[in-house]
Amino acid sequence: MNLAAVEGSSPALNISIFAVFVVITLVIVFRASRSSKTAVDYYAAGHSFTGAQNGIAISGDYLSAASFLGIAGAIAVNGYDGFLYSIGFLVAWLIALLLVAELLRNTGKYTMGDVLSFRMRQRPVRAAASVSTLVVSIFYLLAQMAGAGGLVALLLGIEAKAGQALVIVVVGVIMILYVIIGGMRGTTWVQIIKATLLIVGAFVMTVWVLGKYGFNLSSLLGDAVAKFGEGGDKLLNAGSQYGKTGTTQLDFVSLALALVLGTAGLPHILMRFYTVPSAKEARKSVTWAIWLIGIFYLFTLVLGYGAGALVGAEAINAAPGKTNSAAPLLAYALGGTVLLGIIAAVAFATILAVVAGLTITASASFAHDIYANVIKKGAVDDKAQEVKVARITALVIGAVAIVGGIVANGQNIAFLVALAFAIAASANLPTILYSLFWKRFNTSGAVWSIYGGLTVCLVLIVFSPAVSGKPIDPATGKSPSMLQNVDFHWFPLDNPGIVSIPVAFLLGYLGTVLSKERNDAKYAEMEVRSLTGAGAEKAVVH
């Protein structure tokens, strides 16, 4: 298919603005590297960030290109049903705030494996936690890297696959530099800058759109319905995307479960709680994140309906990238080439910041959990060696992400993001909650829950319509499934959350009660630490 750039796009301007962002952030990363000497500096930024700073960084980690481009487009085309994504992503933070953030900060040190293995046998649980972390991170990375290729076609007008592959390589190399040189401190500053740019950019566009309608939201909604033409009323009513059949309604419930429960189990989000000096600051950082993310998703409501009113669903669907072009097309309609260039650069910055956060999380998990505590059995005298392993791992993961992104470029990447959230909700969250709140929970329960949830989730995704079997779309001549011209699906839902999450909780329960292992004393120690923070600064490795 021949792709053209978004109408009005100036590739030279887009690249120039993005280059300025990269240069500024690389300078900051190099400055941050001067104080990243120890393991606690590299993994947790020396616990030196305030709750407000970490909250901004969390929002930068969480608001990916999918949140910015995807949700605005979904609202422009599907209206109310598109906004349900925003609601799901936001509500998820209440779980993180109420059940996870403070307790996790008090109990762990660097990674999710610290918490899960606190009162268990170290090696099997850390190995399982690291495997889950790596799987979630890599699938999330593939989605972001493939998304970079799509953005290239959309915003820079680079049609050749070789050109798109080159940009994926450039994004990967910059990401690796951020992580290897700056560690968590440098990565956090990149996320703070990116989050600020994204929220300010969305705010400017939101005010601009509302200003065109006299700050009357009803007028905006009415114009969006009128621009849509016949059937435009569906934009204001539920059910246009997920209410057609019982299966689609069930699929939405499944997706909502994965989003709401998966957020509190995403390793790169959980690791951010260790960059603050206390549980109080961890709690404050989540509060900041909720406010910033909530405000941003309110902006997407205006941006989505604004794109529908000023650009039109027909023009959006006809553009390269389809719904993903809604925000860039709106930017061009509002402020011409310059605003489009700024929004394009913000979209690229968004991908860079998210992949950097994912990479440092995956590398830290391997170095701290697998290398230091499984291979070396906790007897790593030289912490600098552990950090060196983390940097090497970041290089390897970056290379895998680049190759995977090139291979996945042009494919349906939605299932990759859904898979990451579903795995986090299935494999990680049940084990985290059991570890923190169930005295009887033991090593067998943790291993059964992580590996069981991971396996069930992967199997159901592979045999779902997201991978194969969806009918061909007459408009594109292609199936929305990842694989074309094959059909081996037997699971009816795109997202397995409604099955895999309860199964993971059940497996954690069965694994525990079928094992005689029990350590009430260690649970009591964990309970005191998680609730009071006593001893939280000490090493967790036994």
Image (cartoon, grey):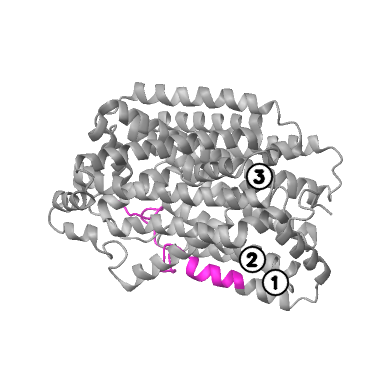
* Type of the residue with mark 1: Trp
Q: Which mark is drawn over residue 433?
A: 2
Q: What is the spatial separation of the Cα atoms under label 2 and label 1, in whole angstroms? A: 8 Å
Q: Are marks 2 and 1 in contact (CB under 8 Å)?
A: yes
- Residue at x 65% of width, y 64% of height: 431
Give whichever of discs 3 and 2 has the lower sequence position.
3
Q: Are marks 1 and 3 in contact (CB under 8 Å)?
A: no
Picture quarter containing residue 521?
bottom right
* Type of the residue with mark 2: Leu
Q: Which mark is drawn over residue 276?
A: 3
Tell me the magenta residue range. 477-505
In the image, residue 62 lies at what x, y percent? Answer: 50, 47
Q: What is the spatial separation of the Cα atoms under label 3 and label 2, in whole angstroms? A: 22 Å
Q: Are marks 3 and 2 in contact (CB under 8 Å)?
A: no
In the image, residue 293 lies at what x, y percent? Answer: 45, 49
Give whichever of discs 1 and 3 has the lower sequence position.
3
Q: Nearer the viewer, mark 1 or mark 3?
A: 3
In the image, residue 284 lies at what x, y percent? Answer: 58, 50
